[in-house]
Image: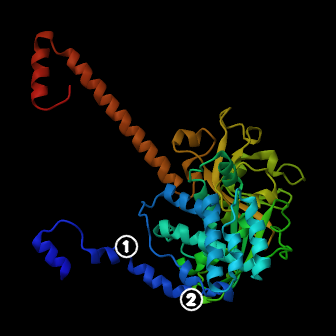
Amino acid sequence: MFCAKLKDLKIAGECPFSMVVGNEEPADFEESAAVNAVPVSREVQGNLTNILPRRKISRSKVNLHSLGESIRKLVCPEFDKLRNALIRVMKQQIDTSCPAACSSDVSQILDNAEQLSDVMRNYSLKTEIPMDTLKTSLGLEVFRDCYEEDGHILRVVGGALHDFLNSFNVLLKQSTPPTPEVQRYIQQASILCLDKDPGLLTVYFFNPLPTTELFFSGIIQAAACWLYCTRVEVRMDVGGKDSSALQANHQPHLLYSVFVRDDKSLTPSPMRTHSSGDIPLSLLYSTFPFHVLLDQDMGLMQIGDGLRRRLGRCRDGQRRPVFLEHFAIVSPEIRASFQDILTMLNTQFVLRVKQHGASSADSPGKHMDLKGQMIFMSEMSALLFLGSPCVDKLEELTGRGLYLSDIPIHNALRDVVLVGEQTKAQDGLKKRLTTNGRAALHDIPRERRSAFVAGASSAGKKV
């Protein structure tokens, strides 16, 4: 009523009471109830109220760039934000249970990221707080900083926790790194979340920074709680207990086991299949004519019908053909090895068919690129590539020895090619109309040309 009276009196300025609640949103109050369900230690449980996101500060638009920047803040936070988050964690512990003598650790000046690990380790020894608890608390603070700024952006990344983590690779490529060092790190970093067992997620972080293990477990736990209202327990496997093909990778990586306590809130993962039926190979060849199945030695176990025609010599001889004999990886920039491909499963792949493997019907000098994704088939310990040619014109398709009928009906490439042909036809028609109009103008006698131009200009036509 007070605000309404101000409007009636036409007094300039804002109502002070509206400023109190103007920055709060109902969604934030609803999210606060979910924080009490986060399964963390007692040292952290008492401070969850202080870690809770208070309000969303910015309202930037949701696009590919903003999505990439938000994910970059989680995966590669700036040193100043990481240091401030650690100082807040230490202050919260001092205010609740730790002696005041530890305040010197909080005010300690951190010059670089390498000192964070030493400071946290010394603080853990003095306060007898487990190191894993400090890592979780630091990750919660880092996530809170990002959530306050870009909470509305983070909520559209994925519909479940494993979808959220598996989207990091693609979105990181859309960000704008501040330094060349961060740019190189983003190109190499890769996150893979597998959901093969009910209630258990296995998260791989390949090529991490030295400071990543100090906070990433808290990132996973906070994302599950605040974005999906799911209670999880995150454990870092130091000894490499997983014996799968992924664990045999020699690249530096972190391995986390995420135990989901709320199974009802965990959506089914495409990694877990319950069907007992077998798909005939003939149906697979025709439905995905540009697929490639690779074994652990990068041998070609099978290929689609479209590639079978392109690679005329692929099945000649008794020896199984090798991937590098007929293909090359254009992107991402990795070695063509089984283990290196496993680290980039959530990245879009572009394979190039080598020219010497093409049939004689193809035009010389025209290579064919395939854009698609790699899928790890754990039952067979094999890699399945599903993709389609990178073309947008009909002549580009036929120039590589393919026809429109080679593209399956479910593939959107058919529409792309047809739309390209339609656009080409419209451009040709427009050009012919323009040329015919100019010729008709030149056929008009000179004495009547001025009158024709003046009449057309007065009618609003462009001459």
The answer to whether 253 appears left or right of 85 in the picture is right
The quarter of the rendered structure image containing the N terminus is: bottom left
Q: Is residue 195 visible?
A: no
* Mark sitting on residue 215: none
Residue 348, horizontal then vertical, whole percent? 64, 56
Residue sitting nearer the eye, 48 or 104: 104
The quarter of the rendered structure image containing the C terminus is: top left
Residue sitting nearer the eye, 310 or 157: 157
In three-dimensional space, the C-alpha distance between marks 2 and 1, rounded to whole angstroms, equals: 23 Å
Q: Are marks 2 and 1 in contact (CB under 8 Å)?
A: no
Answer with the quarter of the image where residue 164 lies.
bottom right
Q: Amino acid at mark 2?
A: Asn
Residue sitting nearer the eye, 409 or 75: 75
Q: Residue at x 83, y 73 (%)?
A: 238
Residue 263, horizontal then vertical, whole percent? 62, 88
Find disc 1 in the rendering and name its residue.
Answer: 23
Residue sitting nearer the eye, 367 or 155: 155
Q: Residue at x 54, y 83 (%)?
A: 49
Q: Earlier in the sequence, mark 2 or mark 1?
A: 1
Q: Amino acid at mark 1?
A: Asn
Looking at the image, the residue that sits furthest to the top is: 446
Q: Secondary structure at mark 2?
A: loop
Find disc 2 in the rendering and name its residue.
Answer: 36
From this view, report whether residue 247 is shown above or below residue 360.
below
Q: Residue at x 48, y 82 (%)?
A: 31
Residue 194, horizontal then vertical, whole percent? 70, 73
